[in-house]
Structures are given as C-alpha cells and as structure tokens.
Image (spheres, rainbow, N blue to C red):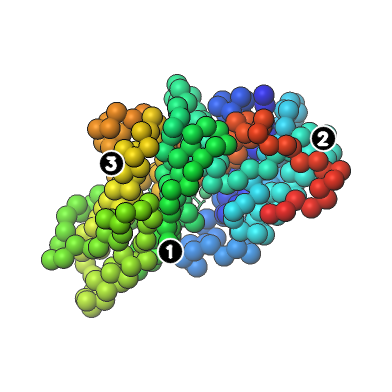
Amino acid sequence: MRILGIETSCDETSVALVVDGRQVTKELTASSQEQHFKTLGIVPEVAARAQVEYIIPLLDELVGKEGLEFDAIAVTYGPGLIGSLLVGVETAKTLAWSWNKPLFRVNHLLAHFYASFLGKKVSKVPGFPCLFLLVSGGHTDLVVFFDHGRYQYLGGTRDDAAGEAFDKAARLLGLGYPGGPVISQRAEQFSGNLFSTPLPRPLINSKDYDFSFSGLKTALFQKVHEFDTLSPTFVSSLAWEFQNAVIDCLLAKSNEALREFNIKSFVVGGGVSANHLLREKCAESAAKLGVDLFLPEFKYCGDNAAMVSSTAYYIRDLVNPLDLQVEVGLSL
Ligand code: KG4
Ligand code: ZN
C-alpha cells in the first residue's frame, strides 16, 4: 500500500511517499528554522507563512513529471501550531477530494512512534508490549503500546518538555537556537563538572512516571548568574551537566517502566532522540534488561512526513478515512 504523507505541525514542511509503512520511496522536507534563529525560538506566524510557500513546490517535486501512483493520503492534524497545521490539512483535503483518494488524519505524537519503523537499516519492527519514550520540543511522555492502537499513558512532563528544556538552557548559556544540538556539541568539548554542586534531577525518585524540567532550568539560571562572565570551558561544563541531568531523569523513569511492564521493545522518538548520549544510555539499558531497542535513523528523529505515512498504514484498519462529502471541516 502506497501512502502519500503530509506533515506541517511546526517549522517543517514535509511530503513523502511510503510503501507498506516501511519503505520510503521519496521524502522531501523544507524547514523555516533559519528564520527563527534571531528570535531564539519559533514564531508561529512566520512558520505558517513559510509553509504556504513551500507546500506546493514540494508536492510538485514529489509527484514529478511522470506522476505518482498512490492509494491514500495521510496528514498530521495535531498537536501543533494551528496556522501550520491548517496549511497541511487544507492541502491534504483538497488533494484527497480532487484525486478521489481516502484521507487519514494522523496524530503527530503517534507518528514519532512509527518513525522507528522506517528506513533500510530496520530489519524488524518492534514487538509488543513496547515502551515508547517520546522526547520532542513540545512533549515528553512515556506510553506502553500493547498493540497498534491499544496503548496506556504512563506519565509525562508536568511543565517543560525535554527539547524545550534544551532550547531554554541554550538560550541561558548564550548558545542560540535550537538548543539540543548545540548543548550536546558543547558537552562533548568538555566532559566534566567544574562547579561544586551538581544540578538537580527533578522527580527522579518520585513513584510515578512524570518528569519536570522547569526547576532544572531555574537551577541553571542561578548557576549562570553567580558569575559575571562565563568562560567557554565553563559554558561547556554547564552544558555537559545539564544534558546529563535531563538524560538521567529520562532513563530513570524509562528503566522503571521497562521492568514493571515486562517490555519486549523500547522505542524512542522525537527531536531529542537524535541526542548521542541519550541513544547510548538507552542502548545500555536495553542491553542490561534484554529488551530490543528501536531508535529512529537521524533523518527521522525530527518532524518528517514519512512517519505520518507509516502511521496511517499501521492504523488504517482501526480508523475510518474521512468522508469529505460529510466532513466539511476537519476538526483540529
Ligand atoms: O520532534 P521535533 O523535531 O519537533 C517537535 O515535534 O517538537 O523536536 C525538536 C526538539 C527541539 O527542542 C530541539 O532542541 C531538540 O528536538 N533536539 C535535540 C537534539 N536535536 C534536536 N535535543 C537534544 N539533543 C539533540 N541532539
Ligand atoms: Zn515532532
């Protein structure tokens, strides 16, 4: 089954054709990230305007001169930035109506789960029960999947998401945007603690599956303001400690869940799953507990349309495609 996917939930505009949920025939992504450098974060209006410009040329290129054969269309309907989502949803509805194809609406968070099913290097798919750690710019959640479409939410962040914490920490350290890649890069330049007290690991011993990163950010803020100037080595040391603190919290709760639910596979997804230290620590945990680990290929860690097509493939028998004759508006 060939599914054309569209993803426009944040600052990426992405289109893809995926066969049988796994083989990516073609995927094209444009990002407005550079337009957000000077504001140190995404301005929704700027992101949506860029998506209006990108979406048709990307689809044109995907379809190509020879045309495109496909069976269905899948589109992210949320969560995300409302203006951005509307660009993708309205485009998908128009295409589904004019080409007379079924249209599946896909949840963006679920799509990050299916990112680990994609790519040539993936020789098998996760078995159930499966623990999903979602770590993105907007979400941090732990979910157990018992099957496709059958899952239990264990817990999540009570305030900032992991990616958001990285972004805010980078801003405090004067490292620009986005924070995740630059924090991990700086942490690799100086691995060690140059200050007397470590940063806190919030909720690490709480008897639940929740996370909290806003206090950690405040602790970093206080550390930064103890000094008039920060040497580059000291900034790297703070980046190293901050990254360790976030990852310690993520792993403590994940390890707990891996044990409690007798998990067979551990899937990690979202932008922060590109973090090298997180990937290493997840591999250590999985090896220790005898669990299969599934990490997305780097190109599928962030937002992309291939994961949207893949999701629609795996849930197509569990949901009805939209009836465009009836559903005039697609509720977001
Ligand atoms: O999944 P994503 O592309 O967008 C959302 O759906 O939110 O995630 C973006 C987030 C940003 O906060 C970014 O700083 C973070 O992923 N990120 C990283 C790394 N690369 C991207 N965080 C930590 N380490 C990285 N290497
Ligand atoms: Zn995302």
**Alpha carbons under labels 2 and 1: distance apart:** 43 Å
Q: Which residue is mark 2?
A: 99
Relative to 310, is 53 above or below? below
Where residue 34 sits: x, y (%)?
52, 57
Tell which tag, 3 or 2, sits nearer the viewer: 3
Q: Which residue is mark 3?
A: 281
Residue projecting furthest to the left? 196
Binning the other alpha carbons within 10 Å of mark 2 as few (below 14), some (14 to 19) or many (20 upward) gives: few
Where residue 29 sits: x, y (%)?
58, 43
Tell which tag, 3 or 1, sits nearer the viewer: 1
For marks 3 and 1, the one nearer the N-term is: 1
Q: Which residue is mark 1?
A: 159
Q: Residue at x 84, y 39 (%)?
A: 98
Q: Residue at x 36, y 62 (%)?
A: 213
Quadrant of image for the N terminus: top right
User: Viewed as shown, does residue 111 lie left or right of 312?
Assistant: left
Looking at the picture, which amino acid does disc 2 mark? Trp
Q: Is mark 2 within 8 Å of ligand 2?
A: no
For marks 3 and 2, the one nearer the N-term is: 2
Residue projecting furthest to the top? 123
Q: Quadrant of residue 163?
A: bottom left
Binning the other alpha carbons within 10 Å of mark 1 as few (below 14), some (14 to 19) or many (20 upward) gives: some
Q: How many marks?
A: 3
Looking at the picture, which amino acid does disc 1 mark? Asp
